Image (cartoon, grey):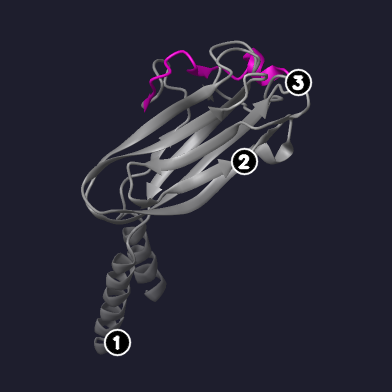
Amino acid sequence: MKKIIFGSVMAMLLAHGANAVVIDFECGSGLCGFTTVSTEAVNIRPFDDVINRNTATGFDKFFETSFLVIGDKQDSIANDPNNGTTTASYSLGKLAAGTYSYFVEFDYVVDTNSANGISPDDFLVSFTGVDTGGLVLKTDSIAQNATPRKKEFFNSVGFTLTQERDVNLSFSLIEESKNNSSAAGIDNLTIQQVPEPGSFALGAMALLSLAAVRRRHT
């Protein structure tokens, strides 16, 4: 009985946060809820697209389903643009002042066609519109075909707001060198608000109360 009560309370607590956002980029049209000002350099491509097939200028067949490309209009990594910042953002809407924690998970590749194998370009993932915190992932440079730049990210990320603000989860490719081109790809994105610690405290109190009631009746 205690296991049943505990399991029920934990399920309730995990469900207390906002519903998880899951994006697999199989929506069929548009950008699956993402927005961008770089309408050509952010696009969804099928798993067999040339940028996922090529070795020196591609993602080496990392993605097995459709995925979002950031930083190339078409074809392989060598395509435009090759300088400036390209950003794709997912809106979490207006959030009230407070402290937040979100679980973030996604598959990603960041690659370059740099002739010397190393590019000064950066890939930045962060919650934007926040006052403090919010950094999810940042690369200081991009190495061609580097294994550490092809993997799954998952972690809890916190941030604070001093007043109500529009908050986005933003993926930015920052291309600093005009002598080469870089690109990023993402897939299987999950965003889930983590329940506040106070919710767990309330759940623990409820669990103890139910256990005490059961003891009095046995």
Q: Quadrant of residue 200?
A: bottom left
Q: Which mark is residue 56?
A: 3
Residue at disc 3, secondary structure: loop
Q: Is residue 67 visible?
A: no
User: At x 34% / y 64%, what residue is drawn?
Assistant: 8
Q: Within 10 Å of the Cα at label 2, are there few (<14), some (14-19), or many (20+) other Cα atoms?
A: few
The amino acid on which the numbered mark 1 sits, given as a three-letter code, is Arg
Residue 119 position in % (x across, y down): 68, 30
Give the CA distance from mark 3 to mark 1: 67 Å
Instruction: Please name whichever residue, 42 or 187, is drawn nearer the observer in this view of the structure.
Output: 42
Q: Is residue 218 magenta?
A: no
Q: Is residue 45 magenta?
A: yes
The answer to whether 15 is drawn above or below residue 4 in the figure is above
Residue 203 position in % (x across, y down): 30, 70
Q: Counting residues from the N terminus, which is met first, the one under dot 1 or under dot 2?
A: 2
Residue at disc 2, secondary structure: loop
Residue at disc 1, secondary structure: helix
The answer to whether 29 is drawn above or below residue 3 in the figure is above
Q: Which mark is residue 215?
A: 1
Q: Within 10 Å of the Cα at label 3, are there few (<14), some (14-19), or many (20+) other Cα atoms?
A: some
User: At x 65% / y 32%, what residue is drawn?
Assistant: 120
The amino acid on which the numbered mark 3 sits, given as a three-letter code, is Ala
Give the CA distance from mark 2 to mark 3: 21 Å
Residue bearing the label numbered 2: 140
Region of the chain picked out in magenta, as a range: 34-54
Give the CA distance from mark 1 to mark 2: 58 Å
User: At x 53% / y 13%, what residue is drawn?
Assistant: 73
